Image: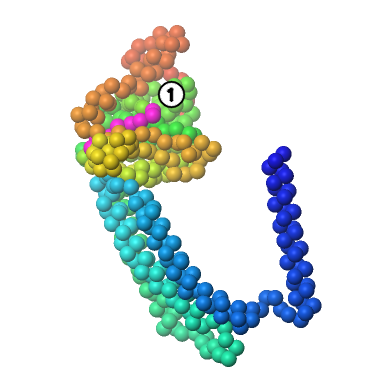
């Protein structure tokens, strides 16, 4: 009820203000005045305000940079992070002088050439040279930046080959959590299909595919070895999500019905980053950077970057998919054999695969 009364008060206030403005306009018209035409005194006052506003404007920007400048990009923790940061810095170097010069000229001309009834403006209709100049220069600068950025993007998104020494991880998104799946000793992911999602099989993995038997999937957090190439695959169950790992300069959309890819090499462990940031509780995070529903803000997963030895130890402790499936079936009172589990499969359905 209180909210309704507040809304009603705001609406009535707006109506009252509009009526007062209408009355003032009618009074001005009756006096033969035009309230929309400023007089010479008002013009001079507004012109003098322009340099004042310019100083205040740049002062506010400088204040924001001092207070929040260190929050623009976190410390880079991937091999390609330095290249991405370099591209960002080059962009700032190009656009900052343009921003400053154009705003100084904007406010200078507004002050210098405020309306004066004794001065007549020069009529200047067109200039091909000027048109080419202010079109070609920005176009060339943008083209260089875009081509540079595109070359970096192509380099960091080109999939690793079978010959590369890498680790493959699938990140599966759904409202509102993440699941990480690791390929087993065979180095191959098992087939999966959204129509096989049932019970504990949250990824829709095909249990009849032998490549799936040694797959491992984890929740809450996942581990990465430092200085090792990681090939990521992204899938989504329901809506479009976006896998965002800011410290690794990595972001990729997760689209239902298709698999997207991204790769990077972590170069700083979680412990090293805690020392760098001075924060003993620092953690890397996988976030969703696409508004995907009411709990989007809480869709995140911890990432632990550790040594190869610690990674191997952690991975060996994770249960394989076959054991999880078998335990589930035993809990349901179904007799099973580890080498012959045959859960329900969609007949005549071509299952998707990552390999």
329 sits left or right of 11 in the view: left
**Residue 29 relative to residue 70: left or right:** right
Q: Position of residue 203 (x, y in %)?
A: 42, 29
Q: Is residue 227 left or right of residue 176?
A: left
Q: Is residue 179 depicted above or below 287 in this figure?
A: above
Q: Residue at x 36, y 42 (%)?
A: 245
Secondary structure under the numbered disc 1 in the rendered image: loop
Identify the image quadrant of residue 341. Answer: top left
Answer above or below: position of 97 versus 244: below
Residue farthest right in this picture: 30
Image vertical order of residue 4 relative to residue 346, above or below: below
The magenta span reads 219-226
Give left or right: position of 21 versus 229: right
Query: Image point 39% across, 34% down: which residue?
Result: 301
Q: Residue at x 41, y 40 (%)?
A: 287
Which of these two is toward me, 307 or 211? 307
Residue appearing at x 25%, y 40% in the figure: 275
The residue nearer to you, when weighing 55 against 65, is 55
Q: Does residue 229 appear in this view?
A: no
**Which residue is label 1 attached to?**
201
Residue 223 occupies which quadrant of the picture? Answer: top left
Q: Position of residue 32 (x, y in %)?
A: 76, 81
């Amino acid at each position: 009820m209180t909210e309704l009364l507040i809304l009603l008060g705001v609406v009535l206030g707006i109506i009252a203000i509009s009526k007062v403005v209408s009355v003032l306009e009618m009074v001005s018209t009756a006096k033969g005045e035009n309230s929309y035409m400023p007089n010479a005194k008002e013009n001079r006052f507004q012109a003098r305000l322009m340099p004042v506003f310019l100083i205040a404007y740049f002062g506010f920007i400088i204040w924001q940079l001092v207070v929040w400048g260190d929050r623009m990009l976190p410390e880079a923790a991937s091999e390609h992070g330095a290249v991405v940061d370099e591209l960002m810095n080059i962009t700032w170097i190009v656009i900052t002088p343009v921003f400053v010069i154009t705003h100084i000229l904007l406010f200078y001309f507004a002050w210098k050439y405020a309306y004066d009834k004794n001065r007549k403006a020069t009529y200047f209709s067109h200039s091909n040279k000027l048109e080419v100049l202010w079109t070609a220069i920005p176009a060339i600068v943008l083209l260089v930046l875009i081509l540079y950025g595109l070359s970096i993007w192509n380099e960091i998104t080109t999939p690793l080959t079978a010959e590369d020494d890498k680790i493959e991880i699938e990140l599966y998104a759904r409202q509102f959590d993440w699941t990480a799946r690791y390929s087993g000793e065979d180095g191959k992911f098992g087939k999966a299909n959204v129509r096989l999602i049932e019970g504990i099989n949250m990824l829709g993995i095909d249990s009849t595919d032998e490549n799936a038997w040694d797959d491992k999937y984890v929740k809450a957090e996942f581990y990465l070895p430092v200085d090792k190439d990681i090939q990521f695959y992204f899938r989504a169950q329901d809506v479009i999500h976006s896998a965002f790992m800011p410290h690794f300069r990595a972001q990729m959309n997760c689209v239902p019905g298709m698999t997207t890819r991204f790769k990077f090499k972590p170069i700083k462990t979680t412990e090293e980053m805690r020392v760098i940031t001075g924060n003993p509780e620092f953690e890397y995070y996988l976030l969703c950077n696409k508004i995907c529903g009411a709990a989007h803000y809480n869709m995140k997963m911890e990432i632990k970057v550790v040594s190869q030895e610690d990674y191997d130890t952690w991975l060996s402790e994770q249960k394989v998919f076959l054991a999880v499936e078998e335990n589930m079936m035993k809990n349901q009172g179904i007799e099973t054999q580890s080498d012959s589990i045959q859960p329900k499969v969609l007949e005549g359905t071509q299952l998707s695969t990552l390999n």
